[in-house]
Image (cartoon, helix red, strand yellow):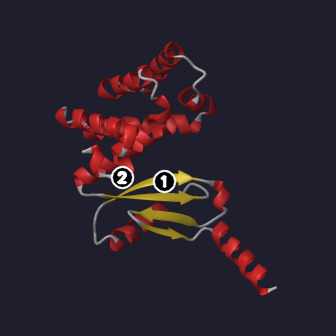
Amino acid sequence: MAGEDPIISGMAGRYAGALFELAREDKAVDAVKKDLEQFDALVASSPDLTRLVRSPVFGVDEQLKALSAILAKAGITGLTANFLRVITTNRRLFALHEIIRGYRALVARHKGEVTAQVTVAEKLSDTNLDALKSALKSVTGGKDIDMDIKIEPAIIGGLIVKVGSRMIDSSLRTKLNAIKFAMKEAR
């Protein structure tokens, strides 16, 4: 299944596909997705945890010890916790973000949803989030939307939305670069 979609190909795709199949057998697809997203949010919010996940300097034993403490504190158990321990033991923890992205894509396809990757300069309010979701739903022919939101202050303002092969970049950074380029051409 992982080989069918180029978004989830390679090593991360194989791990995502294996986890998805296990979760489907256990009827825990949504629970695993929730746990993975919770862990991904923990990693994103902590520079120390990001370093632990991505750095090859830490040994397997150190990573497993830290991971066990984090999982216990976060309340992540069962299939998700076992999976995170396996990828740590296999020295694949650095690919966790891509594995989670692949898993989300598999879940979305399984449910008939469309995944939209949204990049914003700052956290969206609930009102703006709902408006964006309904606009994307109308563009995709009424399909349910699963949004993967990334906050990147470097875009200054606006947003970048990617749904499938379509991308809309209305970021302030892109608009300023276009003006700068036009001014250079006018000389």
Q: Is residue 50 left or right of residue 185?
A: left
Q: Secondary structure at mark 1?
A: strand
Placement of 99 over or under 180, stated as above or below:
above
Residue 22: x %, y % from top left: 23, 32
Q: Residue at x 34, y 29 (%)?
A: 80
Q: Residue at x 28, y 34 (%)?
A: 18
Q: Nearer the viewer, mark 1 or mark 2?
A: 2
Residue 159 visible here: yes
Residue 125 visible here: no
Placement of 140 over or under 65, stated as above or below:
below
Specify the farthest residue to the bottom.
186
> Identity of the amino acid at label 2?
Pro
Which of the image's four quarters has the N terminus?
A: top left
Rendering quarter of residue 121: bottom right
Residue 79: x %, y % from top left: 30, 27
Q: Which disc number belongs to residue 124?
A: none
Q: Nearer the viewer, residue 22 or 136?
A: 22
Residue, disc 1 = 149
Placement of 92 over or under 12, stated as above or below:
above
Residue 170: x %, y % from top left: 57, 71
Q: Is residue 136 left or right of residue 40?
A: left
Residue, disc 2 = 6
Q: Nearer the viewer, residue 141 or 90?
A: 90
Residue 69: x %, y % from top left: 48, 18
Label 1 with label 2: CB-CB less than 8 Å:
no
Q: Nearer the viewer, residue 155 or 187?
A: 187
Which of the image's four quarters has the C terminus?
A: bottom right
Q: Residue at x 50, y 39 (%)?
A: 41
